[in-house]
Amino acid sequence: TPLILWFRRDLRLADHPMLTAALANGRPLIPVFLLDPETEAIGAAAKWRLGLSLADFATRLEGVGSRLILRRGAAPEALARLIADTGATGVMWSRAYDPASIARDTAVKTALRAAGYGAESHPGFLLAEPWQVETGQGGPYRVYTPFWKALRQRDIAPLLPAPKQLPPPESWPTSDRLEDWQMGAAMRRGAAVCLPHQAVGEAAALTRLDDFLDQRLARYAEARDFPATPATSRLSENLTYGEIAPARIWHAAMHRLDAGDSGAGKFLSELGWRDFAWHLIYHFPALATENWREEWDGFPWRGDSADAERWRRGLTGEPFVDAAMREMYVTGTMHNRARMIAASYLTKHLMTDWRVGLAWFADCLTDWDPASNAMGWQWVAGSGPDAAPYFRIFNPATQAEKFDPNAVYRRRFIAELSRTPPADALSYFDAVPRAWALSPDSAYPKPLIALDKGRQRALDAYAARKA
Ligand code: FAD
């Protein structure tokens, strides 16, 4: 009798604890992906990118004598139907830790077990399970540095080989066709523009890791803050869909650290931030929806507005901010320094509620991750755990001088600033919806607000709130 392997954000074969456990059973295996309401609800770019990942993973499964069955519907019912269709006796999956997934998975586990079926969840998405890293008093961490110290001391799961063969069932159940799911339907922007910037699937992720370690790790600590320089790994995109295990990245970087590679320590601690974000959202599920510090609830944030719309479109008149927003539109990702600048400008200079920005990032990023996005926004806004203080307001102009001294990044994404605009700057105009009526010949806009004025307005609101 077969076992059902319910794949979600673990679309790889290597370093996969659930797959290894399933193979040990020696039973036929039926891999399935469900387009359930929780998956339907994710942002446009992430959903499109997930579709690419599913296509790649299906091919990979075929390479080991298996298939990826696609079914639509809420998980408890869809899995019950699949069990009825196949005579399977149980379901296995890799854990997810955001509130919606936890609610779904708990319901599935309860329903399956009540009906006498097996239901087994496994780790693999994080370096450590969120409940395994505890403070001396036994609670969750709220501050990164001690969390990181504790995480570093743990034994991280060993690497696991990719199976050569997955035992197939005697007959395969029916499957939807991926094309019919229209995963890119909500992409407002031209997916063709975004496609060349993606590195899809397990093989691409492993190549990306190797290239990064060989070519960029040594300079990572110095160069990672300069958005025009290809200095970081870009693995966030692959981690989001589980195309690579964080444990694989960890061990590879540790190996370099042991060999004396100077960038490896910094890189490992950045990787640790991802686990910290998931640690936080697991223990504080409101991280993505509510101010983590309650004292922010009374702050006079502005809601959505015409200014926020200009921010979304990369038309604030502040070149570093606009380059950042356009980078996200063209590539599906945004450099970390640029994320901080763009988020700071929205929440401070435009005094806009961080949730307005969080929602736009969630719609546009192909590396969208509910935990890192929420932690990033609350960190910049000042309302989050271990956050930058509100009065520390990034000045996008001086940040640009410091981190984009030759304006390479700004020119790369803002055609209006160059006589001979580079391809990505022009791509932006191919990517935006027609309704925005933008062309590379449009005049570059004047700043929405003078930087000193915006800064003062934010500081005044902060002082008034404290008084
Ligand atoms: P590298 O520098 O190569 O780092 C390696 C890995 O470490 C990354 O792939 C990522 O998994 C992890 N990492 C590095 N920095 C952070 C960080 N600050 N927080 C959490 N993990 C980190 N990251 C996402 O993956 N998805 C998001 O939706 C997301 N939204 C963000 C929103 C805001 C407002 C901010 C300020 C940051 C956000 N980040 C998000 C974190 C960070 O910007 C990205 O992880 C990073 O830019 C990814 O690029 P990279 O893979 O080249 O990183």
Image (spheres, grey):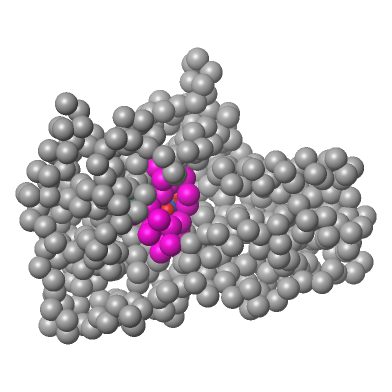
Magenta-drawn stretch, dominant element (helix, strand or loop): helix
Residue placed at 33% from the left, 35% from the top?
297
Asked if the magenta segment contains residue 256, the reply would be: no
Residue placed at 43% from the left, 62% from the top?
363
Q: Nearer the viewer, residue 250 or 187?
A: 187
Q: Is residue 344 visible?
A: no
Q: Nearer the viewer, residue 125 or 392?
A: 392
The magenta region covers 357-375
> Relative to 247, does residue 145 appear above or below in the rendering?
above
**x, y percent for residue 78:** 77, 59
Residue 86 is drawn in which quadrant? bottom right
What quarter of the picture does the N terminus occupy? bottom right
Residue 52 is drawn in which quadrant? bottom right
> Relative to 211, does residue 25 appear above or below in the rendering?
above
Asked if the magenta segment contains residue 374, the reply would be: yes
**x, y percent for residue 28:** 87, 58
**x, y percent for residue 149:** 43, 27
Q: Is residue 69 left or right of residue 364?
A: right
Residue 305 is drawn in which quadrant? bottom left
> Relative to 63, does residue 337 appear above or below in the rendering?
above
Residue placed at 82% from the left, 72% from the top?
174
What quarter of the picture does the C terminus occupy? top left
Q: Is residue 166 left or right of residue 439?
A: right
**x, y percent for residue 442:** 17, 81
Q: Furthest residue to the top?
A: 137
Residue placed at 77% from the left, 71% from the top?
175
Q: How many marks?
A: 0
